[in-house]
Amino acid sequence: MDIYDDKHLQELLSKAETQREGFELMVRKYSEQLYWQVRRIVITHEDANDVLQNAFIKAWNGLASFHGDSKIFTWLSRIAINESIDFVRKQKNLTTVSTDDTDFSVSNTLMADEYFDGDTTDAMLQEAIASLPEVQRTVFTLRYYEEMRYSDMSKLLGTSEGSLKASYHIAVKKITDYFKSRD
């Protein structure tokens, strides 16, 4: 028996006496995948770790509301993405600077981040993504990096597939324009 099997995890999570064990296994199984989802939205390693920790705290506190209607990863992903979006909103409210300053800050932050292993093109892509509105940024990140299907995104974000497709294509156009303007 695979101890990381979702069916087994759901069984462990549903019983008070095995809930902690199930949660620990769930965290081990999904931490890395969720980390990268979060990291692509919030940009820095430290912020991603903080957001992910908050997401797991919310998941622990919300275990009673998880009835297995969706996959465990889908449920956790929804929590992590919502935490990421909330974090980005709070950051925006704390700093009101021009777009050029924001881009400069994202680039500098990434290049200074010891966990960022990209080059200047990667940093530029992250700047372009950071300049997108929240919804477009989230949709682009899930589609481009996670290769998530629109149907799965629709369930995750509670939005129609048509709306998600439109958001993605607008985001791609804005990112393309961003790169063209930097040539």
Image (cartoon, rainbow, N blue to C red):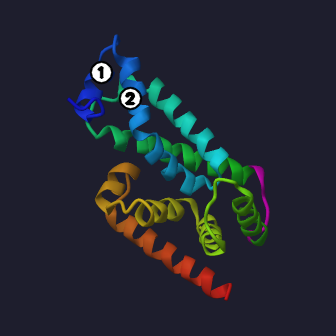
Name the residue at 59% across, 83% down. Answer: 177
The quadrant holding residue 6 is: top left
- Residue 144 at x, y = what percent? 44, 67
Name the residue at 44% across, 33% down. Answer: 27
Name the residue at 61% across, 82% down. Answer: 179
Q: What residue is shown with label 2?
A: 25
Going by the picture, which residue comes out furthest to the left? 1
- Asked if 162 appears above or below 50 in the picture, the reply is below
Q: What residue is shown with label 1?
A: 12
- Residue 175 at x, y = what percent? 56, 77
Nearer to the camera, 177 or 17: 17
Assign a secondary structure to mark 1: helix
Assign a secondary structure to mark 2: helix
- Residue 101 at x, y = what percent? 79, 67
Name the residue at 49% across, 76% down. Answer: 172
Q: Quadrant of the N terminus?
A: top left
